[in-house]
Amino acid sequence: METKIKCTLKKALKILLYIGFPFGILFFYFGVGYINKQCEEYVKNTIKYEIHKGIVIDKYIDKENHSYNTVVYLSVEDSSAKKIIYPNDKSGLIDYIEVGDSIVKNSNSYSFDIYRNSHKKSILLDFACTQ
């Protein structure tokens, strides 16, 4: 009886290997492609057209929002506090920005200009999903 169970288990593992493995690869390949496409669309249709102009007043890790690095700035356009949260950005923008910096990001651009102590640094956003 024990030999019969082992034989059945071996057959089941072979079936899983021959059928499950190719489906797993296809799922991974198309799943990653779908996620990458969503990322590209979000970056091209939303982030590209965002406008940020102001002075950084706070920078923190928002533990209530997935522990995302968050920058808060006082907008020069309407004097309101606004947040920048780019969890997938690989450019180092959020790490570089400090409280007191002036920031500018114009519409139709992926570039942030950061002004600190009379020096300007431009950082190009990199979400690793756009070409």
Image: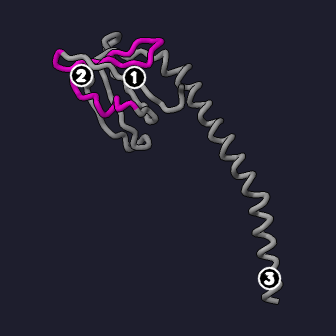
Mark identifier at residue 5 = 3
Residue 41 image offset from top left, x and y in percent = 59, 25
The residue to which callout 1 is attached is: 124
Three-letter amino acid code of the residue under disc 1? Leu
The magenta-colored residue range is: 91-118
Report how far apart the C-alphas of labels 3 and 2 lie in the structure.
69 Å
Was residue 102 drawn as part of the magenta stretch in this picture?
yes
Who's the residue at 20% across and 20% down the image? 116
Disc number placed over residue 101 in the picture, else none: 2
Dot 3 amino acid type: Ile
In the rendered image, which quarter is residue 123 located in?
top left
Type of amino acid under label 2: Asp
Q: CA distance from mark 2 to mark 1?
A: 17 Å
Asked if residue 81 lies left or right of residue 4, the reply is left
For residue 55, the mark is none
Q: Splitting the image into 4 quarters, where does residue 96 fall?
A: top left
Which circle's residue, 2 or 1, is located before the other in the chain?
A: 2
